Image: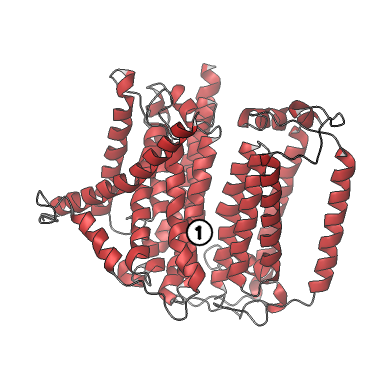
């Protein structure tokens, strides 16, 4: 792999990282609005408010960057970067199409993805603690509790796919994919996607940022660009979770069309799942903290273990 | 030994140690960074900063693993230590209302004993490793630490230690449950709807161990029957 090739791949990943989350954000504006009988943004950019998020970005860039007097300055300022960058690293290893259509194929790609996404949560924790604000601290606490509960079912569900494929490499998993994996890994897909939603703190799992109780959780004190980074990391997270679910459980580039159009399938599945994420936000009320914990420990983890058992039995039966 | 034999022989090196390659220089530099952040993490008076420096140290270790081509181990290091252990430590610190800025009482009387133990442990390990390998040279082929190779060695040659370790972890788990339940007569029930304020942090420098144990100790009302 030449230097130019590497450079091009990195640039491509950065471009995807900067544009796709905005597309998902704009979709969320419009889809939510229409589901609630509103129009959503209509003016910015002219056609159905397509430039609304660009305008938002300009607005964020103009705002004053405030650091509270009692805050821990360095940790406070570092937190948005810690929250945002892991998602960019994860995008680097998600395969889009066959024949090396991936930023960088990693041997233990599945572990890499889950490990790096875990770091992103450190950003929320740092923000929650460093803000010197009780609401932020509560948000940080809830984030940590939620992460620790939902990391386990997510890992178990991912392990089930790795068992089925016999590899941890993401392109390798897709290479071993057959259509009947979808019903076979259906429970795992549900667990993974749900736990992913919880890890992103998306509704109905948005207890850590519950606006009616603790303002905006760990991000309460943030303004301007740093606040925008946290928002961007949330939407980048939706992109990453949707893409990962598509790759692990829905067959990524596999679909009824020539293989050269495989990337189209990956994108289609990813955005369909992103739409589901938005849909769920509009549909379900927020789970209470105890319901949230009970759901993880008494529902998702047993389901994930069941999926592991099914995967093992079927794997032994067909080999 | 067999693990090393896979990567290369242990014959005396025909290579000079005075002309390091780029990877070796990076390895040393990252090693220095790990050492530095580890020292800061145990000497700083700011509790949360200590946990965050621990992140740097553990992440640096993951990079060292990567430079030694042990890719799988590196990602597992990130997943377990950065993603879970540090989050747990931070969670515990937040429960104690770790103050922003210096904790004046975060000073342990065991400081010099701890230094002695650390130096003794480091001395033993360094002597052991240096004596075991001397001037032998292990060639690091690409893929020498890939998932497949690691898995094959783990479950073919090292199964017994692996299973023994899992029994040890199980024992630790049971022990933690027992420890957190023995004092249940004395633990006051947390008042409903209020965050327990906790003591000021850092009494005797045992903050980390005390706080990680606390979540289990302070949430008995659901399970107790």
Residue A205 placement: quadrant: bottom left
Q: Nearer the viewer, residue A31 or B168?
A: A31
Which residue sits at x=29%, y=43%? A274
Where residue B89 appears, as percent x and y from the top left, is 60, 63
Q: Nearer the viewer, residue A287 or B112?
A: B112
Q: Is residue A64 left or right of residue B127?
A: left
Residue A192 placement: quadrant: top left
Where residue A74 appears, as percent x and y from the top left, is 50, 69
* Colouring of the image: secondary structure
Q: Is residue B224 visible?
A: no
Where residue B53 appears, as percent x and y from the top left, is 62, 62
Location of residue B141 with respect to A271 vertically, above or below = above
Q: Is residue B89 left or right of residue A241?
A: right
Where residue B116 appears, as percent x and y from the top left, is 85, 66
Q: Secondary structure at mark 1?
A: helix
Q: Quadrant of the C terminus of chain B?
A: bottom right
Q: Is residue A88 visible?
A: yes
Label 1 sits on residue: A122
Which residue sits at x=66%, y=69%? B210
Report how many numbered discs are placed on residues in the image. Answer: 1
């Amino acid at each position: 792999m030449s230097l130019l090739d590497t450079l091009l791949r990195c640039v491509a990943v950065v471009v995807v990282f900067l544009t796709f989350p905005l597309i998902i954000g704009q979709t969320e504006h419009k889809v939510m609005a229409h589901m609630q009988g509103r129009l959503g943004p209509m003016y910015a950019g002219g056609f159905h408010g397509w430039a609304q998020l660009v305008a938002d970005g300009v607005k964020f860039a103009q705002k004053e960057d405030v650091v509270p007097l009692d805050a821990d300055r360095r940790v406070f300022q570092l937190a948005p970067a810690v929250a945002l960058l892991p998602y960019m690293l994860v995008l680097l290893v998600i395969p889009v199409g066959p024949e090396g259509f991936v930023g960088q194929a990693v041997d233990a790609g599945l572990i890499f993805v889950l490990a790096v996404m875990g770091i992103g949560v450190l950003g929320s924790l740092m923000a929650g603690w460093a803000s010197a604000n009780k609401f932020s601290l509560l948000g940080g606490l809830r984030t940590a509790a939620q992460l620790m509960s939902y990391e386990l079912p997510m890992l178990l569900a991912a392990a089930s796919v790795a068992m089925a494929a016999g590899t941890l490499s993401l392109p390798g998993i897709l290479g071993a994919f057959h259509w009947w994996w979808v019903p076979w890994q259906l429970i795992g897909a549900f667990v993974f996607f749900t736990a992913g939603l919880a890890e992103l703190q998306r509704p109905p799992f948005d207890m850590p940022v519950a606006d009616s109780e603790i303002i905006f959780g760990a991000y309460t004190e943030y303004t301007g660009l740093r606040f925008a980074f946290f928002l961007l990391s949330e939407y980048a997270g939706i992109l990453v979770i949707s893409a990962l679910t598509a790759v692990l459980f829905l067959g990524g580039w596999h679909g009824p069309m020539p293989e050269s159009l495989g990337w189209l399938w990956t994108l289609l599945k990813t955005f369909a799942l992103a739409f589901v994420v938005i849909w769920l936000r509009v549909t379900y009320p927020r789970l209470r903290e105890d319901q949230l914990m009970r759901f993880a420990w008494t529902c998702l983890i047993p389901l994930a273990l069941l999926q592991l058992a099914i995967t093992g039995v079927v794997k032994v039966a067909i080999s | 030994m067999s693990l090393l034999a896979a990567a290369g022989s242990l014959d005396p090196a025909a290579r000079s140690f005075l002309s390091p390659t780029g990877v070796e220089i990076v390895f040393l530099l990252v090693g220095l960074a790990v050492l530095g952040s580890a020292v800061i993490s145990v000497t700083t008076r700011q509790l949360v900063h200590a946990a965050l420096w621990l992140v740097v140290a553990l992440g640096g270790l993951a990079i060292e693993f990567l430079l030694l081509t042990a890719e799988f181990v590196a990602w597992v290091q990130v997943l377990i230590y950065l993603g879970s252990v540090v989050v747990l430590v931070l969670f515990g610190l937040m429960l104690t209302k770790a103050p922003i800025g210096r904790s004046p009482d975060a000073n342990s009387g065991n400081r010099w004993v701890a230094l002695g133990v650390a130096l003794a442990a480091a001395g033993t390990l360094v002597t052991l490793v240096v004596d075991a390998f001397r001037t032998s040279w292990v060639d690091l082929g690409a893929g020498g630490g890939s998932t497949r190779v690691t898995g094959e060695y783990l479950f073919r040659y090292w199964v017994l230690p692996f299973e023994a370790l899992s029994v040890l972890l199980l024992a630790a788990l049971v022990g933690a449950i027992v420890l957190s339940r023995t004092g249940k007569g004395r633990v006051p029930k947390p008042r409903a709807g209020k965050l327990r304020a906790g003591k000021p942090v850092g009494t005797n420098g045992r903050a980390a161990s005390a706080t990680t144990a606390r979540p289990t100790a302070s949430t008995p009302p659901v399970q107790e029957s």
